[in-house]
Amino acid sequence: MRALARWGMLPLLAAPLGAWALGIGNIELESALNQPFKAEIPLTATPEELQGLKVAIAPLATFQRQGLDRPAFLSGFDLKIGKDSGGRNVISITSQASVAEPFVTMLIEVTTPRQRSVREFTALLDPPVLLPA
């Protein structure tokens, strides 16, 4: 039984631990249509990865390779790595200008010293709820 347990753990020890460290969650939208864009994406990373981590909207060539249009308003988006109110690591995406498009499709490029990852996100911007006067 002990030998079986040792052999069963061998694949876990042989796998590179760094491959499991960086994780990008789903986009959590905090804005509505015709408002400045505000969203967060949960990020799982080791402290070492966070030090060298860079996030950005992917360049036009990457959009073209994926067969996607790159709207001009994406150039006004600001991406930063930070913490949310619960203390978890997030990618914060904001814009100064209002977004009038109901669907926002973007490719986000996450780069560490060891790897580069591009992930597509689509956000549906609902009209703001009108409150009674």
Image (cartoon, grey):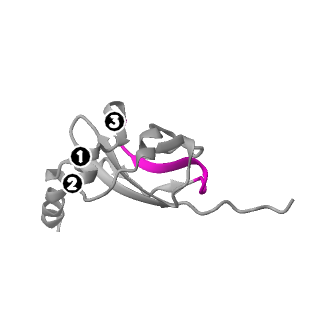
* Residue underneath mark 3: 53
Label 1 secondary element: helix
Task: Give the CA distance from mark 3 to mark 2.
Answer: 24 Å
Percent from the top left, x then y, of residue 27? 46, 56
Q: Quick check: marks 3 and 2 in contact, CB under 8 Å? A: no
- Mark 2 and mark 1: Cα distance apart in space: 6 Å
* Residue type, numbered disc 3: Leu
> Mark 3: few, some, or many residues within 10 Å (few <14, many ≥20)?
some
Q: Which residue is drawn at 45% across and 45% down?
A: 73
The kind of residue on which mark 2 rests is Arg
- Proximity of marks 1 and 3: CB atoms separated by less than 8 Å: no
Residue 96 lies in what quarter of the image? top right
Picture residue at 32% right of the left edge, 37% below the top = 49
Q: Is label 2 in contact with label 1 (beta carbons under 8 Å)?
A: yes
- Residue 126: image tag: none
Instruction: Tell me where residue 44 appears, x and y as whole percent.
Output: 39, 47
Tell me the SS state at disc 2. Answer: helix
Which mark, residue 65? Answer: 2
Viewer-nearest of discs 1 and 3: 1
Q: Name the residue under label 1.
A: 61
Please report the bounds of the magenta region as a residue range. Answer: 30-47
